[in-house]
Each structure stands twice: as structure tokens, then as C-alpha cells.
Image: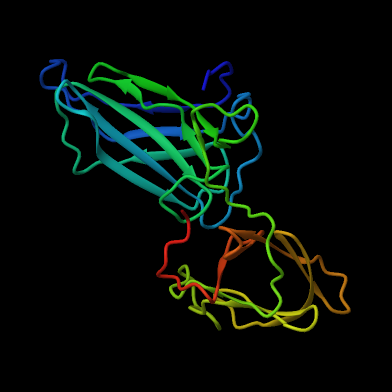
Amino acid sequence: MIMKYVAYSIIILFFISSCNSEERELFPVSGIIIHNQNEPTSLNENFNFNKNSFVLITISHQNAENSGEAIYKERFDSIDSFPFEFVLDPKEFTSNNGEYTVKAEVFAQERNALFVGDLVTENGYFFSRNTDFLELEVFGLEHCDADFADSLCTTRNEISANCAPVNGKIFKGHPVPPPCTGGEGCGNPGSVSFSQNNDSASFYPTNSDAIALLSFIQEDSKLHLFFEESNSDPIEFLMINDCKEIQHKRSGDVYRDSDYGWDVEINQ
């Protein structure tokens, strides 16, 4: 990716413990992440913040014998906006001779692979013991089939297409739901059930004891659930991961087709 625009950056300050370069150590790192949405070969849409979004910062060591071994990673949850400020506290970090690289990845969902719309730095940026700070940028991953995509792309597409009707299906939340602060329904995985013979649905939200009876309309990968005799806005879901899961657009909660267990990897 050719960086033509400098809109946002991660500024990381490394504090040095000694004036002697042979004795200097790299101490905890502070910084800021902001999204660059001006790169022609990137996906420049707004990032899909939700309660499952997280940031992963990786530091790697570079020398003649070692080409990019990751020696420190730290994860940050509860990211809900840019700029995102952070402090790394590498208590087990051991500095070595040579140079280091640092990179940032921002995931829209809980997973270990990057999807279209997730954010990454183009490359790891080099720094050494004499470096005072680094400027890094994160960009939206485009699908590799997109007209202007370059080598920094992915074939993993979160939003599915050509989804079959959901009639008769039940989608269940993860058996270990996100932590909650107590109250009725706390710990409930939740579910969404669709009638086989008509357009009715029931929605039992994660970490809630409330159940809603609704009507629904399916538009390929989009599901619109409506409260009967109410002027409330519809509940919106997107079908993702080859139509095997649905994601609540507002909360980010994911419910999986009950034909597939949560112990099965389906993100590939």
C-alpha cells in the first residue's frame, strides 16, 4: 500500500534508562491509534465498533539471525472510537541487540484472523534503542477481488451473500457469553428463532431474560425484525461467515446456526 496521506497515527514513546547505549532498556510504551481513511487501495469505510472490537499490538525483534519473531503482544478490549489511546506495560519484555518492529491490528469481532474491514498497519515499523517515537498508520482491509486492492488484502469477507431463507432455523449465542454486571438473565447465551411456516420470529438477547416476539423480513444477508403494533425501530441483523451466523448490528452479539456447534471453526 502506498501511503500518500498522513491522517492518523500511533505515536509511541520509548523511555530510555541510561545514557549508555549499551545499557539502555525499552520501558513501557504509550501511544494513540487513529484510522486513516484516505488511502485509495484500502477500504475507507467507517470501522464497525461494537462490544467485541479489540486492538492487538505486537512487538517483534529483528536481527541477522531472527527475522521478525514476535516477542511481545498486548490486547486492548472495549475500543469504541478513534483516536484510541493506550499504554503498553511489557513486564516480561526482554530487550535484545538489534532492531524492533511494532504493528497494530484492530478487529471488529472476536477472532484470530483478519476480515474485510478490520484495520492493520501496512508493515511493522522499525525502531531501535535510540528511537524516541514512531508514527504508524492503520488502514481498512479491502477484499482481494476489489478493483483497487493491492497485496495488503484478505479473502475473508464478514458479510455473506446469497443466503438461503432462515425459516425454521435457530441461531444460538455463545455458551460462554460476555461478562455482565448481574441482574435477571445475566449469563444467558441468547437465541434467535425463525418460524418455518410464516414470517414470525422470537429474540432472546444475550445476557437478558426478556424475549421479544416479532415479524421479520429477510433481504439476502440482512434480517429486519419488527415489533408488532409498535413504532419502534426494527432490530437489525447481518448474516456473516457464509450465512452460518447472524450478528446484531447494534450490540455486536453473534448467534450461530444451531446446525453448527460453537466448538467448530467456521471462519476460514
Of 46 and 242, nearer the camera is 242
Image quarter of residue 128? top left
Question: With respect to residue 167, does 14 lie above or below?
Answer: above
Q: Residue at x 43, y 73 (%)?
A: 176
Of 97 and 150, nearer the camera is 150
Q: Residue at x 71, y 76 (%)?
A: 167
Q: Is residue 34 visible?
A: no
Question: With respect to residue 253, does 170 lie above or below?
Answer: below
Q: Percent x, y for residue 51?
A: 54, 57
Q: Is residue 136 visible?
A: yes
Q: Percent x, y for residue 122?
A: 45, 27
Image quarter of residue 251? bottom right
Give left or right: position of 200 versus 149: right
Question: With respect to residue 142, does 53 lie above or below?
Answer: below
Image quarter of residue 150? top right
Give left or right: position of 251 versus 95: right
